[in-house]
Amino acid sequence: MKNVSDNPNSRIIVALDYSDPEKAMALVNACSGSGLKWKVGKELFTIAGPDIVKRIQDAGGYVFLDLKYHDIPNTVGGAAKAAAKLGVDLFNLHAEGGFEMMEAAVSGAKAGNPDNPPKVVGVTVLTSLNDRDMNVMGNMDSAGARVVRMGNLARLAGLDGLVCSPKELRDLRYMWPEAALITPGIVPEWAADNKDQKRKMTPAQAIIDGTTYMVIGRAITKAENPLEAIERIVREIEEAMPNHGKNALNIMEQQRVNYMLKMYQLDADRFIKAR
Ligand code: C5P
């Protein structure tokens, strides 16, 4: 993958899901210089505001602003510009907000920081949802098919990649080889189970399936010793790295994705032409 350092720590984005900014900063400072990346999500940002982003940056940290924008294009474009001005490295949005909203986010990111715009990634289907959850919301696509459809739209809208379930990595890596694929839903064998992550995987398996970065929250933040938990995950990644992305789709699986993509591309082409 382009622009990803060989340091296995750089593959980990720690979800700083704390209600106390001092706890978040204690972990950031304890890991200073490690190359780990930091995710500021809704809880921490709502409590601590842009100041927490600045504090992490002052400590030399890479910030993924996880506010999952989802609104009309003008509003998301403005939010994207603000995020870029704040200097975050990466932010996300819900691809379900639509093609024009995604385009507005990419333009906003460039307008806010023309020299070094943040990367923009789209959430396809939340990893807490499975096929039954999708169906009860009236969505007859399986979660897996929906991910391919939305992933294709995000690619056409100019995004840099996707947030996805690790179970969807192989399909998405095949259909979009250069994408930044960011996977939450990562739970090491030894960690207490996170029951709300229905489509989960171990760090090693996610590497073998081709993840770019993995988001890990509770397996680290709720561990008795978070630094030791990080170290165990880093070792697991290091061991798996020689096989990064090796679990690629076989020919039959490629045909399945090609078939889906053909249908979705027809829809997308029709939409783009009619604009
Ligand atoms: O604690 P855990 O490792 O399950 O944390 C996962 C993190 O990833 C949470 O901060 C959650 O908000 C985030 N997430 C995400 N996109 C998803 C699913 C979870 O950013 N599709």
Image (cartoon, grey):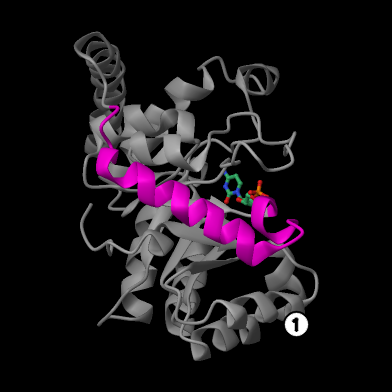
Q: In this view, does 102 lie above or below 138?
A: below
Q: Main secondary structure of the magenta part?
A: helix
Relative placement, left or right, of 36 versus 148 is right
Q: Nearer the viewer, residue 270 or 86?
A: 86
Q: Is residue 41 visible?
A: no
Residue farthest right in this picture: 19
Residue 127 sits inside the magenta stretch = no
The picture places residue 58, in percent across and down from the top left corner, at 51, 91
Query: In which quadrant will I find the C terminus?
Result: top left
Q: Can residue 65 be seen in this view?
A: yes
Residue 219 sits inside the magenta stretch = yes
**Callout 1: SS:** helix
Relative placement, left or right, of 13 versus 240 is right
Q: Which of 74 and 229 is in front in this view?
A: 229
Mark 1, residues whose alpha carbon is within 10 Å: few (<14), some, or many (≥20)?
few
Relative placement, left or right, of 244 versus 2 is right
The picture places residue 177, in percent across and down from the top left corner, at 22, 40
Q: Residue at x 77, y 59 (%)?
A: 224
Q: Residue at x 46, y 23 (%)?
A: 144
The picture places residue 241, in percent across and down from the top left corner, at 31, 46
Q: Is residue 35 above or below residue 168?
A: below
Residue farthest bottom in this picture: 58
Q: Name the residue under label 1.
A: 22
Q: Which amino acid does label 1 sit on?
A: Glu
Q: Residue at x 40, y 57 (%)?
A: 11
Q: What stretch is highlighted in magenta?
A: 218-247
The picture places residue 76, in percent across and down from the top left corner, at 50, 62
Q: Is residue 227 above or below residue 205?
A: below
Q: Residue at x 80, y 69 (%)?
A: 19
